[in-house]
Structure formats: C-alpha cells, structure tokens
Image (spheres, grey):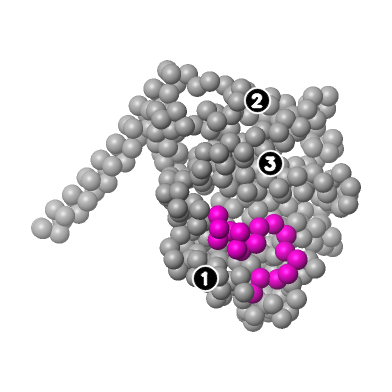
Amino acid sequence: MPILSCDLVTNEDVKSWKGLHLLNCPPSLCSSKARLCLKELGLPYTSHIVNLHRGDNFSEWFLGINPRGLVPTLVDDGRVIIETKDIIEYLDCKPGVRRHLVGDKTGSEAKELAAESSMHGHVRNLTFAFLLPPGKAKKPERYFENMRTAALREPENIVGMSIEENVEFYRTYDSEGGTINETILKVSLLALNYNFKKLNARFCAAPQDAWMSGAEEPNAVDIAWFCTVNRAVLCGYPLRYCHPNLADWFVRACERWPEEARSPVPKFVSYMLDACMSVRGTKLSSYLPGAEPSSPITRNILTVCALSAGGVVIGATVWMVGKGIKNLIK
C-alpha cells in the first residue's frame, strides 16, 4: 500500500501535520527525485532535512514516522508514504497538479523506472568509491544497533534493499577499510554502462530537444535517470566521451534542474580526491573498458591545483588558529 498503515506510524506529532511535508536529505538520490517531482508538479511543500551521516534517520522520532529509517518520506495531512516510487505516483494523482509525470504505470514506462531503480546499489558503490573520502561513510556501532532496532519494525513486502541488506553493506564497507572492493566496482560500472548505452541509442534518431518519452517536457523517467546520471558524472563517469547523445540530454536536464546538479562534496575536497586518484591511477575511467584515457598533462595540472588548494586551506586554518591563540594570550 502506498500509504503506511496507522499502526506503523507511532509518531503522533506528524499525524497532525497539515499540507505536504517531505523528510529528505540533500545528497540522497531518492530525495532528489521526490523534490524534482514536487517542483515539476507545482506542489508547495515543507522540507524537513534528515542528517543521514549523523544517523538521524534511525532516531526514535524518525522511526516513528518511517519504520524503515529511509528518506525520502512524504507526509500529506498526516498520511505517510515511504517508498520513492509510491511517493511519485501518489503526488502525480493529487488534485491541482500542473501536469502528470507518470503515464503508463504497468507498461514500458514502469519497466524503465524499474531499470533505473535497480541501479541504486551500483550508484552507491560509485559514490562511496569516487565521491567520498575513504572511510567517510563508516558507521559507529551505535548506528548498527539502531538499524537492528529498525529491522524489527520493518513492514513486510518491502521494495528495494532491506535494512538487513543495508547493515551487511556497511559491515563489508567497514571491513574493507572504508573502501569498495575493486571487483564490485567493475560490476557496478558495467551495469551503468550497459544502461547508459541503451539510453544513448534512444536519442540517436530523436529530435535535438526531446526528452526520454519524446515529449516536449520531462516525465518521471527523465527525473529518475537524471539523478542517476548526475551522480555518475559527479563521480567522474566520462559521459560525453562514451555516450554523446545522452550527454546532450543531460545538459538540457542540468539547465532545467541546476539546483539538483550540484555536488554534495565541497569543490576543494573533490579536487584533492581527483588529484590523489589521478596519481594512483584509480579514477573511475580506469575501471571502464574503452573510456577516454586521461592525459598525463591534465593529471599533473589537476594534481598541482588540488594540492595548492589544499595547502591554501591548511595554511589559512593554521593562520586563524595562531591568531586566535595570540588574542587569548593578550
């Protein structure tokens, strides 16, 4: 059922909320899908930020709303909807929407959304390997205890990864020293590359300004794949080199949704990570057969720029700390 049954919602506060409320996390891909759907449908809503890194999604307060401990979670006049697919379909059916994003809920469109949804685990692998510093997503033991508590409340007939599967993922990530296994990375990249090739072929004969459905405006399939492609590009996927037609579509999507195209990681951190991976030869393109080879000159320039930026940040921090100590002495 799209709407969570009342007995699973133990947080009494949200039952009195009026209007649309979205509990979400800015870096979350699924949260991005829900925000874009709300924007395209022209529906006003109140945003509630849930800090996933801090583990707020496994707090007693949040689990009282969503027993799975996942974002996004939609609350509409006290009614709770917890799965991204259900959230999108629920919003699409609300009275007063500007237009509809979901057309065919059982045919080709549904299959395309399912195909994109199956990429979620692969995208997470890329994010942890190429976008976050090593070990950044490691979890304390308290986090796993909270996840085990949440698993006891998890509804039946869930869609996607169960809490136990998520626990297993983070346990493996921690045991690997805060990194993703190379074999797993290659599998994830092959899966994304296969789907990107299919999407690229679709635009070969399409009009230059066409969206996924061939219509003049994007639909739910465009939104879903935009979030996945955007994350892959932020991780260093050579989209323009490998899939030029899909890259043209992506440029149009970025122009329409610039607020969701930003990296969740500060630029200077991204530059330093890119420099380190360039030196070690572990950039994303090095795992992708037939990808554009990186230029040694480009690698050297990136390395110098990144290290210089890092030096400036460290120097400024030392200077500020020193100045603060002097003021204390005075």
Q: CA distance from mark 2 to mark 3?
A: 16 Å
Q: Quadrant of the C terminus?
A: bottom left
Residue nearest the observer in this picture, 188 or 16: 188
- At label 1, counting other C-alpha atoms closer than 10 Å, the crowd grade (few under 14, some 14-19, many 20 or more) is some
Residue nearest the observer in this picture, 66 or 141: 141
Residue 138: quarter of image: bottom left
Indicate the amino acid at tag 3.
Phe
Q: Which mark is residue 82?
A: none
Q: Position of residue 80 (x, y in %)?
A: 71, 70
Q: Image point 73% across, 69% down: which residue?
A: 156
With 269 as the anchor, is 33 left or right in this view?
right
Q: Image point 75% across, 76% down: which residue?
A: 5
Residue 276 vs 173, above or below: the answer is above
With 278 as the anchor, is 107 left or right in this view?
right
Indicate the amino acid at tag 1.
Asn
Q: Position of residue 68 (x, y in %)?
A: 63, 67
Find out whether residue 155 is within the magenta segment: yes
Q: Looking at the image, is mark 2 or mark 3 earlier in the sequence? A: 3
Q: Position of residue 266 (x, y in %)?
A: 45, 44
Disc 2: which residue = 242
Q: Image point 77% across, 47% down: which residue?
A: 113
Q: Which stretch is magenta?
A: 153-169
Q: Secondary structure at mark 1?
A: helix
Find out whether residue 310 is within the magenta segment: no
Label 2 or label 1, whichever lies nearer to me, is 1
Q: Looking at the image, is mark 2 or mark 1 earlier in the sequence? A: 1
With 31 as the anchor, is 146 left or right in this view?
left
Disc 1: which residue = 146
Q: Secondary structure at mark 2?
A: helix
Indicate the amino acid at tag 2.
Cys
In this view, the residue farthest toward the left is 330
